Amino acid sequence: MELLPVEEALALLLKQADAESIREHETVAASAALGRVLAETLVAGLDLPPWPNSAMDGYAIRHADLSGEPLSVSQKVFAGMQPVELMPGTCARIFTGAPLPDGADTVEMQENVRVLDDGRVSFLAPVRFGQNVRPQGGEARRGDSVLEAGVRLGPVELGLVASLGVTEFKVVRKARVALLSTGDELVEAGQALAPGQIYNSNRVLLRHWLERLGCEVIDAGVLPDDRQKICDCLDSLDDVDLILSTGGVSVGEADFLGQVLREEGQLTLWKLAIKPGKPLTCGYYRGVPLIGLPGNPTSTLVTFGLLGRPYLLRRMGIAEVEPLGFAVAAGFAWPKPGKRREYLRARLEQGKAQLYANQSSSVLRSVAWAQGLVVVPEHARFDEGELVRFIPFSELFG
Amino acid sequence: MELLPVEEALALLLKQADAESIREHETVAASAALGRVLAETLVAGLDLPPWPNSAMDGYAIRHADLSGEPLSVSQKVFAGMQPVELMPGTCARIFTGAPLPDGADTVEMQENVRVLDDGRVSFLAPVRFGQNVRPQGGEARRGDSVLEAGVRLGPVELGLVASLGVTEFKVVRKARVALLSTGDELVEAGQALAPGQIYNSNRVLLRHWLERLGCEVIDAGVLPDDRQKICDCLDSLDDVDLILSTGGVSVGEADFLGQVLREEGQLTLWKLAIKPGKPLTCGYYRGVPLIGLPGNPTSTLVTFGLLGRPYLLRRMGIAEVEPLGFAVAAGFAWPKPGKRREYLRARLEQGKAQLYANQSSSVLRSVAWAQGLVVVPEHARFDEGELVRFIPFSELFG
C-alpha cells in the first residue's frame, strides 16, 4: 500500500472539515470571547478614530494662517475634551490624542516651536499641510469590515473589538471533541503502576491542547484493548463533532480501534508518509468523524499538530489553520534520505537547528526540550548549514 | 537626552526582575497547572519507560538463539501484560509497547518474518542485536532532572509530568499585576461616546494577554488625567508585584503618570530608541515596580511584548523569556535609516514580509492583520528581498 503524502492528507481533511463546518452560533460577551471564533463579520459602527486628533503634543493650526508671523494661542485642548472652532489667525495648544478643533488642519510638534514672552508661538521649521493629524476614520470607516468571520479572537482582536465599542457578538459554537485513549498498558497518574503498565501522557497533552484551541473536551476515558468495549464506547459518542483517540491504530492484533473503523466504519485515510505517525487513521464511525492518532507521544503530537489541529480549527470556520514555518540553518547533516516526511524535535542554538539526541517516537521529553520541528521532506538529503524548514511550537500550541 | 537602545533597556529590566523574582510557591494539582511555572526541579521517580518494551509489532528473541533455523513461539505479549521469561530457543509474539520478556534482547518486526505452517517463525532479514527494543530508562532514569525549575508548563510539559505519574507539585505564585489606564478620553465599550472620547482598547488587550502569561490581573480602573487621583490610586496598589499602566508617560502637560514617577517615584528607564513606544517609562512608586506603557495601542503592544512580557516572565523565574525571531525576505525596501529600532506590522506573503499600509502607532487594526513584527535595526537600510528579522506574534502572545 502506497503511503499518502502529508499535503494530500491535509487537503483531504480540510475538504472534509469545510463540508462539515460547525454552523451553530452563539452570542457571547466580549469579555468571555478569548479564543473563540467570530461567526459574523464585524462591521465598524463608528469611524475609528471617531474624530480627527493630534498625533503629537504641540500646536494645532490652520495651515493657511502660517505667514512667518507668530500665532497667539486661543485655546488649549487636552485628550477627551471637546474643542471650540479654531479662531482664525490663532493656534491651539493640543496634546496627543486630543480632538482637532474645527478649522484646524495641521499640527506642529512642540519641539519645533518657540513660545515667545508674550505667549505667542513662533514656528521654527517648515510645516507640511495636514502633518501630525490622525484623520477621522483613518483606521476604519463606519461600515468597514474590520474583522472577518472565521477569525480567532486573541488579545489583539478583542482589543480591536473594544475600540469599536462592541460588547457582544456571535461566535461559532465550540467544537465538541470526545477524547479517548486505548491501551491495556495505560494507567492514570496517581494510580500504582503494575508490571508492564505505563502512565498515560497523551490524554493530558491533548486535553490541554484542545482547550487552548477553543474546543470543548468530552472525556471518553481510557479503553482496554477489547473490541466490544471500544464499539460500545464509540456507539455512545453520537453527539460529538469529533472522536479523537490515541493508540490502537497500527496493525497489531490488539489494535482494535483501527480494525473497528476499517470494518464497521468508513476509512478516509490511513498510513501516511509521515515520521513519526505513519498509522494515523481517519474516517467516520456511524457518521461521526474520527481521528485515530498513533499512541506514541511524539507521533500523537506530530499528527495532531500537523493534521488534527488544522482540521479542527477549520471545522470551526477558521480560514488560516496552518502554522508558519521558517527557513533556518540545520545544525546537523542528513545524509540518508527517507521515504516519509520526517518531523524532528529541534532547538535553535547559535542560529542553527540542533536535534534532540533521542528522536524515538516514544520520547516526549524530546518535545519539552525542543522549540519546534524541523521538517525533512521525503527523499531529501542535506549537509550541515543548509536551510531547513522549522515550525516553532508556539505556532502549533496557540 | 540620549535614547536608550532596546537591548540595554531589556538587560536592565531583566536584571531588576532577577533581583525581585517571586519567591512564594504553592502546591497545585497537575490538572490545574497549565501555564504555571515549575518552582522546583521535577525529578523522575521511576525509569521512563519503566520496563524495556517493544518499539514494533513483531517477535521478541534472544539474539544468540538465531541460527538460521525457525523458532517456535512460546508466548504472546500484549501491551500492559506481564510476560514470563523467554524460554531458550523460542521467540515471543509481541506488540508495540508491550514489555520485553526477561531473556529477550531484540525484536524483529513482523514484516520481516514468515510464519510457517507449523507456527514456527522464520527470520528473513539480518537481525541486529538489540534492535526495536526501547530500553528501560531510555527516556529518563529514576533520579534524572526531567524538567527544571523555571519551566512554563504547557500541554507537552504536563504530558511529561503525567508520564512520570506525578499528580501535584510546586509552582511559582502568579505575578499580581495591577492594570490601569490613564486618559480623560477613554470610555469603556458599552458606554456612550461623548465628543472627543474614544473607546479603551489597551485594557482589554493587556488583561487577556496577562492572563495568558499566567498573571493574576488586578483591575485598577481607568484614571482621569488628574495628578492627585493618580497618586491616590498608586498609593492603594502597595501589595502588587507590578503596576502596569497605559498612557500618561509622554511629555505633555496632562501626562501626569510620568510626572508622578519622575518626581515622587524612582525612574529606572525612560525614552527608548524604539518605534513605536519611545515614551516607555519604568521605575518604582513607593517601592512597587511600575511599567508605564505608552497609550497608543501599537506602542502598548510593542513595548509590552518586547520589554514588559520578558520582565514579567522573568519575575516568575522563567529562564527563557525572549521570543524566537527568524530571518525572512523583506517584501519592501527601507531606504531611509532611522535613529530608533523600528517594529513594523507585517504578514508573510509568498515567503516575503509585507507591511500593513498604515504603520501609525494608533492603528491596532494593523496588528490584527499582521502575523508578526519585522525588526528594523537603528541606522539600517535595505532593499526589497534582503533578509530581515521577523518575530511571529505566536511567540509573543503564548
Image (tube, coloured by chain):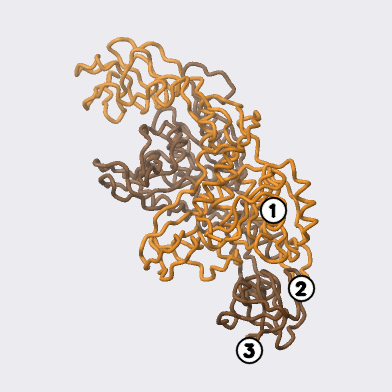
Chain colours: A brown, B orange
User: Callout 3 environment at 10 Å: few (<14), some (14 to 19), or many (20+)?
Assistant: few
User: Callout 1 environment at 10 Å: few (<14), some (14 to 19), or many (20+)?
Assistant: many
Q: Quadrant of residue B71?
A: top left
Asked whether residue A24 is in view, the answer is no
Residue at horizontal 35%, vertical 43%? A342
The kind of residue on which mark 1 rests is Leu
Q: For the residues carrying marks 3 and 2, which lies nearer the camera in this image?
A: 3
Residue at horizontal 65%, vertical 54%? B292
Chain at tag 1: B
In this rendering, would A177 be left or right of B126? right
On the rendered image, what quadrant is the N terminus of chain A found in?
top left
Q: Are marks 3 and 1 on the same chain?
A: no
Q: Nearer the viewer, residue B293 or B235?
A: B235
Q: Nearer the viewer, residue A138 or A201?
A: A138
Separation of residues labelled 2 and 1 (CA atoms): 30 Å
Could you tell me residue A354's position as x and y percent?
36, 40
Residue position marked by numbered label 1 in the rendering: B261
The kind of residue on which mark 2 rests is Pro
